[in-house]
Image: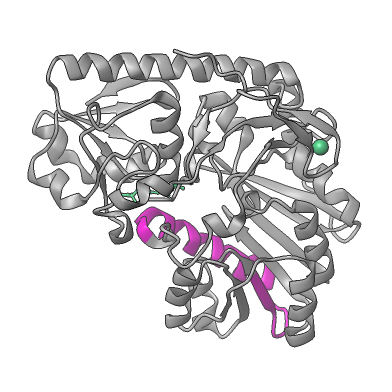
Amino acid sequence: MTKSGPQHDLSGRCRVCNAQISAFMSFGRMPIANGFLNEEEIANEYFFELAPAFCEQCSMFQLITQPQPEKMFHGQYAFYSSSSRYMQMHFEAFANKVITEILAGGSDPFVVELGSNDGIMLRHFHPRGIRHLGVEPSVNVAEVARSRGIQTTSAFFNRKLTEEIVGEYGRADVILAANVMCHIPDLPGVAAGAQHLLASNGILIFEEPYLGDMIGKTSYDQIYDEHVFIFSATSIARAFAPYDLELVDVAPQITHGGSMRYTLARKGSRQATARVAKQLAQERAQGLDDAKTYLGFRQNCENSRARLMQMLNDLNEQGKRVVGYGATSKSTTVTNYCGITPQLVEFISDTTPIKQGKLSPGAHIPVRPYGEFIRAYPDYALLFAWNHAAEIREKEQAFVAAGGQWIVYVPDVRVIS
Ligand code: TYD
Ligand code: ZN
């Protein structure tokens, strides 16, 4: 097994504060995480080196190189937010909270969501007659939202776009984003856009995979092309401060294997809750602002890979059938970093039609409809969609009753039945 040092001298400038940064490890040659492909597309498959860095100046965890956004978010974007029932419920609760706690009493409020995908969140604003605008560059998912009557523009969010939005609709009372902010490489451009777009008493709320969870659980599969950043309260507070936006609240979420919801407001417009100071202190205690923490994380990734491959090779030698469960973006990092082949994992079961019949990016494991998993249960299911474990294990009781077992690798590699 090779060590996970960067293959080249991977250094560059911090995307937020412009300090000099260097990758502390590399996950190697990596394809587009949602780049499911056909056999004939293999010859032209795109790869880049997936290497994370930690900025010691502003504490931002980020990728050194990232593919062009147009390679990831386009008319064939394979991720539809509404594919999970739990996520649907989560966004209903999120939307209701915004409506009752924030918009209540305001006259004719206006809500903007970045990366509104198929409308999983805005669909709760639309029937109440709340003025809204979704900003979604992936046209296929945006089209689903439009067909539900949700006002959506297919564009990338930046300062220039916010000028157009303000011109047409006025300023926003709330700007929302979920699992999107960490996709946008020009975070300062987003902050500048939010600064322009927000009404004087407006708030910006977004939730994203949380660095503290990723480090604590060695869930390295959060690192893939789309996630150019993994945020912490520390790095968010610093990134938005130059735009006079202040972190006024934080709230941990269980979604996506551990997320954090950040609330920001114009400086001085709202009192920060005690939760903010507490979170910042907790992050210092966890060492999230210390470069040494990331060397420990690198070691943990290497150990996790070695254990998973040992287990898959052993099962293969015993002639056991192993099938992947959920062709997640995250699984692209795991399969490529660990070197999982179709010999070891027969296919990946997934409910998303656009992924079915294709091959997984890089590792080229066939993705098959869920019906095939049910039709002939494997001996083991490798839970790539581990962030949906509660929903999936509840749904798959018959698999376990039939003697099936789960392989999980977060927070450590083990078999559960
Ligand atoms: P998700 O875990 O949201 O993440 P990401 O791509 O961000 O890593 O994707 C879940 C994938 O798993 C999606 O392709 C749908 C699939 N899935 C199933 O096949 N069955 C299920 O029961 C669930 C919940 C998801
Ligand atoms: Zn920085």
Instruction: Decide which of 269, 104 is in the foreground and name it.
Output: 269
Horizontal arrangement in the rendering, residue 72 relative to residue 211 (left or right): left
Residue 295, given in percent of the width and then of the height, sits at 65, 16
Pick the residue in front: 71 or 399.
71
- Check residue 92 for magenta coloring: yes
Image: magenta residue range: 83-112
Identity of the residue drawn at 28% across and 60% down: 353
Q: Verify whether residue 402 appears in magenta.
A: no
Q: Position of residue 310 (x, y in %)?
A: 32, 13
Residue 288: x percent and y percent?
A: 71, 26
Residue drawn at x 51%, y 20% as measured from the top left: 301
Q: Is residue 71 left or right of residue 61?
A: left
Q: Is residue 368 left or right of residue 389?
A: left
Query: 112 and 136: which one is in front?
Result: 136
Q: Is residue 398 positioned above or below 243 on the image?
A: above
Quadrant in which the N terminus is drawn: top left
Give above or below for 220 relative to 144. Answer: above
Instruction: Write the residue at 26% across / 16% down.
Output: 313
User: Horizontally, is 346 left or right of 289 in the view?
Assistant: left
